Each structure stands twice: as C-alpha cells, then as structure tokens.
Amino acid sequence: MSDTLELESVTVSRGAGPVISDVSLTLRRGEVLALVGPNGAGKTSLIESISGVIPHSAGTIRLGGDAIDKVSRVTRARRGIVHIEQGRAVFPTLTVRENLSLTARTPAEVDAAIAQFPELEKRIDAPTQLLSGGEQQMVVLARAFAAKPKFLLIDEMSLGLAPVVFTRLFPMVATLAEQGAGVLLVEQFTELALGLASEAIVVATGHVTYQGDAAALKADPAVLHRAYLGS
C-alpha cells in the first residue's frame, strides 16, 4: 500500500458541473500509466485534482493508503507527488542551477540531475529565460529528477516542442520510472504514450471509456478509435 497512488470514484467539477466523473485507478511506483483522450475530456482537471491544484468534488484520493483529499498541494508535494504542468514552468530569472536547487537537497543531487541532460551543463549558470523551449523542458524534467518523486504527474510534455526535441526528452520518462517513480502521463502523442506505458486509461466526454493493457490498446486501432469517440 505504501507504494500506491489510488483514486476511487473521483469526480472533478468546474463551474456548473463535472468535467470528469467516476475515475478509479491505481498507480504503483515504477510503472507508467498513460491517460489519453481527446482535448477537453478532463485529463488536465483530473491530474490537477491529484496534485491539489484544484479540489475534487466526489470520491477519494489515497497516497500510501492514506486519504489526502483535504491535504494541501504543498504537503502532497512534500509527500512525493510532483506535478509537471503544461507550459514549461521554469523560473525564468533564475539560472538552471538555481532552478534545480529548488528541489534538490544537495549539490550532488543537482549534479546527478544535470548528468541526465548533458545539453544543460554548458548552460548551468544561464538564466532559464535565455534557453530554448526544448532546453527549458529539460530543466523541468531535470528538476523532477532532483526531487526524487514517488509519483510524477506529467501534463502534455510535448506541447509546443518540435518532434525532434520531444523524441529526445520522451525516453527520460521511462528513466524516471526505472528509478522508482510512478508516472501518470497525459500526452497528445497517443501511440508514443501507449508504447511507453504498461497500463492505459482513455477518457472521452468526461468519462472513462477504456481501462486496461496499454499494448493491447495500441495494437487495436478500432478499439482506440471507439474509446476516443466515447462509444
């Protein structure tokens, strides 16, 4: 139980009503779970509720068996839930080193994170606002490495990046899982996400339309198509 993040019948509402309803899942450390579906299906709202950015309106979220429904975002982060939001959330006026030091506990952990991204070594003392979009996303991922997350929520890492840059970064998600993080991956490149994940959830029209083996879903385009249509 200590190595699980669990959702039981979670519903998230915004404004007049629910945007995603009745989601149950179990994410274990060392696994990658792909959360895919059409735009507007509620994927971002769901992971924001897990990290504590927004509240959920029904159901229970458990970390290591303990309900965290009333726990703050900061406390969830301290307990090992790291959320990589859309838009390359770096601190632009801070250097690369300073950005990584926000999550690393020692200089050695900064060095270990940089070792995963050699491209950043020559920019280590540059303000991140001077870096390219791809380099900034490297900083975001390196900061996640330095944080040593138990569970990592990644929301559309590829957004705004050239395919050549994204394909360089994507394998780092597998590396994070190999180092012990449970990864919940929201990604618009569905086939790549399903190829990396062991399990998959498809949401459409605010509901789960498929839940099961990622490889099986990737292998059957008809099933994937029906899931995206919500049928």
Image (cartoon, rainbow, N blue to C red):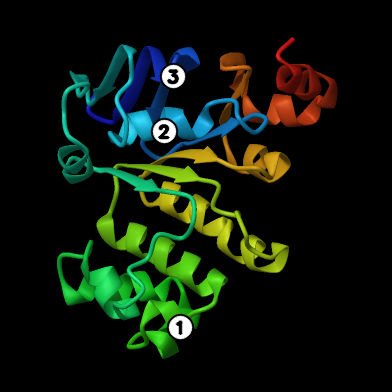
Residue lying at 52% horizontally and 30% vertically, measured from the top left = 43
Q: Which secondary structure lies at badge 3?
A: strand
Q: Which secondary structure lies at badge 1?
A: helix
Residue type at mark 3: give it. Answer: Leu
Q: Residues within 10 Å of mark 1 (few under 14, many from 20)?
A: few
Residue type at mark 1: give it. Answer: Leu
**Vertical placement of residue 2 versus 88, above or below:** above
Q: Residues within 10 Å of mark 3 (few under 14, many from 20)?
A: some
Q: Mark 3 or 1 closer to N-term?
A: 3
Q: Are marks 2 and 1 in contact (CB under 8 Å)?
A: no
Q: Which residue is mark 2?
A: 47
Q: Which residue is mark 3?
A: 25
Give how far across and how far down residue 227 sits, in percent. Answer: 72, 18
| Mark 2 to mark 1 CA distance (whole Å) | 29 Å
Give how far across and how far down residue 198 sits, in percent. Answer: 57, 33
Report whether 114 appears left or right of 100. right
Q: Residue furthest front?
A: 16
**Closer to the observer: label 3 or label 2?**
2
Q: Which residue is mark 1?
A: 130
Residue type at mark 2: give it. Answer: Ile
Q: Mark 2 or 1 closer to N-term?
A: 2
